Amino acid sequence: MGTDAMITHLVGATALILIVAHTAGWLSRRWRQPTIIGQLIAGIALGPTLLAEVSPELSRLLFPPALAPVLTGLSQIALVLFLFAVGYELDLGVVKGRARTVVAVSLAAFGVPMAAGCTAALLFHDRLAELGAPRDLSVASVLFFGVALSITAVPVLTAIVRENGLAGTVPGTVAVAAAGLIDVMGWTVLVGTLLETDTGGGLSRQLRLVLVLVFAAVMLLAARPVLRRLLWGTGVDPSVRLAVLVGFAFASAWVTQALGLHVIFGALLAGVVTPRERGGTLDPDLVRPLHDIGMLLLPFFFVVSGRSVEIGALDSTAVVAMVAVTLLAVLVKVGSGTVAARLSGLDRHDARTVGVLLNTRGLTELIALNVGLQAGLLSGRLYTALVLMALATTVLTEPLLSVVRRLRARAERPGTEGAPPPPPRTPVDAPSAEAL
């Protein structure tokens, strides 16, 4: 395909992707679901599940094979921008004041699903291998399945908390803070998982580990003071600061990709070490454009992800596996989060709310699954089943919250036998995030 033809196809595909995905995201919000749900469904629909099934000729015309590397590149650019913003907004300072509760909830809601996922990978490895897991049972493949069940999506969860009036309440703040710790643990395990795979460009595992530790140390210890000295002085134009920091994020992503990890880890680390304003507040001149550009380009990631999802290829075994994984994911996440919150002193209704919120996997789960897909830790029907699990667990959040609200209202209704007096709901500060 010539350059002119490639540009023509790219412009047409961009128009289709942006219009369809953002319209689907808007409709999803109208139906009280996160934007990611509509955009992911749109991405799946533009792939082999619907478009290629209905009209293979139209699918090849809109998305010729030669265009795939370009779309993949755009999707990675979107991920770098999005995760740079996520890392910059990550604030574990909300743990203060409820550290015991948050740590207990995060450890339980990460450890129990992690153990359940690893155990399932060991017990049902033959079945999972038939669906797309590696034939050789490696430490990396077992750990990855555990991570797939333990992830919580902080940005989506934060949006759900805000939209349901839970921002500033104890369960909302505990859930958001615990989700932040869960994701830190999840990304850390995922880094270790990828170090076990052969994606390091010929570097030995030991050398890669040393280089990763050195890079992380330099970023955590030196990057922040250097950036503050260079970019937060007097006379630095905000647009220049934005450009340099975005370049910094891409450079960090390039390093982690070269070390055989993934661009997401470099982008996250760059966001974490980027200085905040005095007092710990976020720089609006940085956050606003990052969100605007990231949200604009994220549909490319959903389309690239959706083109690997083939719902029509799911046979009865794959459907049973998808249902079983979804039920397991919901039970271990909601159950562990609820029990840990209850044992930490929250009343039973607030504890249920925390457990339900932590079941939100959303975009973070989808990113982790794509990392595993690129690393060869899963493929085919298993990837499709886990994507649908991520979709289902996120969709279930709003209905489950409604059930919890009804249980609370019934228990607090005057005259209800045995109903305890409603506990005071202490308002606390909660972090903000752009709705997804």
Image (spheres, helix red, strand yellow):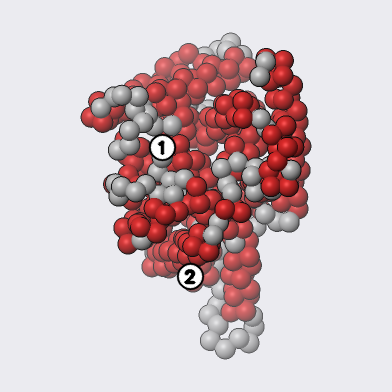
Q: Nearer the viewer, mark 2 or mark 1?
A: 1
**Where residue 74 is drawn, which disc sits there?**
none
Please give the name of the residue rendered at 52% of the width and 34% of the height, measured from the top-left corner.
83
Residue occupied by mark 1: 375
Residue 185 against residue 79 in the figure, above or below: below
Quadrant where the C terminus sits is top right
Where in the figure is residue 348, as x and y percent of width and height? 49, 71
Residue 278 against residue 181 in the figure, above or below: above
Where in the figure is residue 240, as x and y percent of width and height? 59, 14
Please give the name of the residue rendered at 58% of the width and 79% of the height, measured from the top-left corner.
411
Residue count near mark 2 (Cα–Cα under 10 Å), binned few <14, some 14–19, many ≥20: some
Residue 251 against residue 40 in the figure, above or below: above
Where in the figure is residue 4, as x and y percent of width and height? 72, 15
Q: Secondary structure at mark 1?
A: loop
424 or 141: nearer the eye?
141
Question: Mark 2 touching mark 1, by CB under 8 A?
Answer: no
**Left or right side of 163 for 372:** left
Task: Say whether residue 180 is visible.
Answer: no
Residue occupied by mark 2: 347
